[in-house]
Image (cartoon, rainbow, N blue to C red):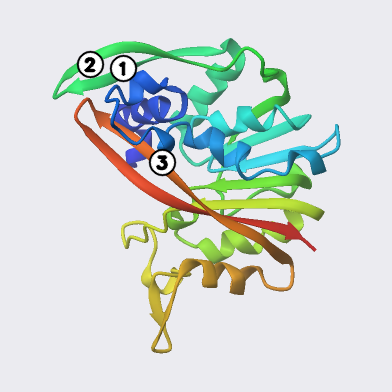
Amino acid sequence: MNPYETDKLLHEYLLFHYGTADEVLPWPDGPRAALDYPARCVTECLDAAALSPSARALDIGCAVGRATFELARFCAEVIGVDYSQRFIEAARSLAADGVISYLRVEEGMLTSATEAAVSEDIDRSRVRFEHGDAQALPSEFGVFDVVLAANLIDRLEKPRQFLSQLPRLLKSGGQLIITSPYTWLLDYTPLDEWIGGCAVSGRERGTLDGLKEALAGEFTLVTTKDLPFLIREHARKFQWSVAQASIWRRR
């Protein structure tokens, strides 16, 4: 079974996206700078001042939708797309009602009930969610001023196929934000499809170099930055990672 369709990951991602600081990390000496990662993918990477009032955004691999809602602070229309039907159903519930209940694991089979909520100052009517494959995005979506792909490329079977679609999705001057910890695994991506984290013709290649090669001629790299993030598995176990954000402009 796809792990992203399980209760475990659904609830884990709702906490990752919407949990308060104390819900996710009650330990005062913990890495609090790594909290609110989906929101920081927007606030720390988006050039909001460059957007028009009618701007459109596409959040690919949106999971349960936090970054999609955050983009709606700056864009008139935002589409969130994810391959997990469970994630999309949860995101649609949040768009409709603003809140959804879920369980936070404390220890073993012990859980506590809590809620994920969209901030009241976000216009949820600007957002819609679609179930879909990042590697085969429909042309009916149109073109966008912003495309965000957070923690996506190293979970795709064919990341180059995904990247090849980006020129038709972004307007000239549009912003592309790609974030990833570059955790390449054979469980998700065949080795010959890796764009980094491997040797090519006897030379080591990092993922950023692979992105530069795949996006050459269509995009200009503006900057990169490190974005730490924290996923809580239970009260005493956490995943601390550091994604690299690469920010690009469509030529």
Residue 107 coordinates in the image, percent (x, y): 15, 23
Q: Residue at x 32, y 43 (%)?
A: 240
The Cα–Cα distance between marks 1 and 3, rounded to whole angstroms, is: 21 Å
Name the quadrant of the C terminus.
bottom right
Kindly state the secondary structure of the residue where label 2 is placed: strand
Q: Which residue is mark 1?
A: 103
> Which comes sooner in the sequence, label 1 or label 2?
1
User: Is residue 1 at least partly visible in the picture?
Assistant: no
Kindly state the secondary structure of the residue where label 3 is placed: strand
User: Is residue 147 at least partly visible in the picture?
Assistant: yes
Residue type at numbered disc 1: Leu
Q: Which residue is mark 3?
A: 229
**In the image, which is nearer the foreground, mark 1 or mark 3?**
3
Residue type at numbered disc 2: Thr
Q: Which residue is mark 2?
A: 111
> Which comes sooner in the sequence, label 3 or label 2?
2
Left or right of 219 on screen, residue 151: left
Q: Residue at x 33, y 60 (%)?
A: 185
Name the quadrant of the N terminus.
top left
Residue 190 coordinates in the image, percent (x, y): 38, 67
